[in-house]
Image: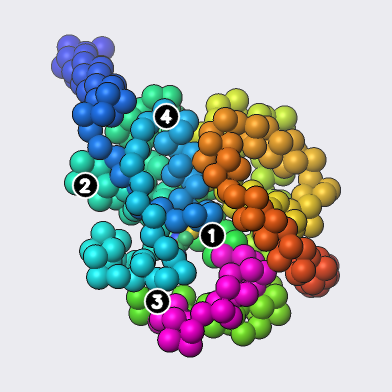
Amino acid sequence: MPSCSLFALIGRIRYALQTSERQRERQRECQQGKTMLKLYQAGNSICTQKVQITLDEKGLPYDTQNINLFTHEQYSPEYLKINPKGVVPSLDHDGNIVIESTLICEYLDDVFPEPSLVPDAPHQRARMRLWSKAIDEGIFEATRELSFSAMFREKMKAMSEEQRQARFRNVGDPARTARFKSTYAEGVESPYVFQAIATFEKLFKNMEQDLSDGRTWMLGETYSLADINLMPYVARMEYLDLLDIWTADRPHVQAWWARAKERPSFKAAVSGKLTDEDVASMKTYGGAIRDRVRKRRDEYLAGLA
Ligand SMILES: N[C@@H](CCC(=O)N[C@@H](CS)C(=O)NCC(=O)O)C(=O)O
């Protein structure tokens, strides 16, 4: 090896060691309360749950501020300065704001690297991001549409007309308005719900395919943000009593899910935070659309044949 390449390699190794030492120091500072993490969150919010699982896996203490999505605190001028999209979660790390749950989870892994939840190998990292893309480009909205058509729709019926219009208007995003209006008016018959059912079908098919080589977690033997990104959305389908519609004949997904929900972080961030009332109402409302969701899935599958 020419000597200049050797010097470059030594430089890179030294840089990597110094960087990881700096990151570990930040982690210690957070655990000792010298650095502050504050999570803007909402009860039973799937995107918030991803971040809470990540924080718990890393043993990071954090403050919280609840944003009431039903009284539209997310659209208040103060909160819009933090998150211009008018959604939760948002993270404040010593005054630096990070929004978007996928980015928050990756940020936490960059700043507080232990235990690592992002694989080292670039190809594995790309695989991990394929799962987070699947969530951000379809599964989040699919989960929202199914949840809305089952239960949030009922809550919206109890809102005043003015409040309902504020929710439809949101922050001026016409795509969100169209989805909210459709699931409110048509419930499970909304075309967005049909798309949601198809989106979950594709997700579980892909998961089953990857897991069928017997791996423990989505990327292999190491638990990662790929698993964390998926967990709250799969959990929501289970709480709505809909999950088995897609997973009954997918044993590898079932086994992955059984392992995932046994993790202490899932209990701390998801199941342990839900009230008995939350759990009961998800089951009741989800149960009420279950037959229709199953039939619409059958229609979707028949269309593929
Ligand atoms: N892509 C965003 C989505 C955030 C999002 O839509 N959060 C929901 C709760 S899970 C929300 O705040 N909804 C309020 C609204 O749409 O008005 C993320 O992953 O952070």
Q: Amino acid at mark 3?
A: Asn
Tag 2 and tag 1, C-beta contact below 8 Å: no
Looking at the rendered structure, the secondary structure element under dot 1 is: helix
Q: Earlier in the sequence, mark 4 or mark 1?
A: 4
What crowding class fits label 3: few (fewer than 14 Cα within 10 Å), some (14-19), or many (20 or more)?
Answer: some
**Mark 3 near ligand 1 (CB under 8 Å)?**
yes
Would you place residue 241 above or below residue 195 in this image? above
| Dot label at residue 58 | 4
Q: CA distance from mark 2 to mark 3?
A: 25 Å
Q: Is residue 296 left or right of residue 37?
A: right
Q: Circle 1 sits on which residue?
A: 140
Q: Residue at x 82, y 68 (%)?
A: 291
Type of amino acid under label 2: Asn
Whether residue 192 can be seen here: no
Disc nearest the viewer among 2 and 1: 2
253 or 53: nearer the viewer:
53
**Quadrant where the C terminus is found in the figure:** bottom right
Q: Mark 4 near ligand 1 (CB under 8 Å)?
A: no
Which residue is denoted by mark 2 in the rendering? Answer: 96
Q: Report the mark closest to the observer, 4 or 1.
A: 4
**In which quadrant of this rendering is ligand 1 seen?**
bottom left
**Could you give the CA–CA distance between mark 4 and mark 2, rounded to whole angstroms?**
19 Å
Mark 2 or mark 1: name the one nearer the start of the chain: 2
Q: Which mark is residue 170?
A: 3
Question: CA separation, marks 3 and 4?
Answer: 34 Å
User: Tag 1: residue type?
Assistant: Phe
Residue 113 pos. (x, y %): 36, 27
Secondary structure beneath label 3 = loop
Residue 24 visible to the viewer: yes
Tell me the quarter of the image containing the N terminus: top left
Residue range of the region highlighted in magenta in the rendering: 144-169
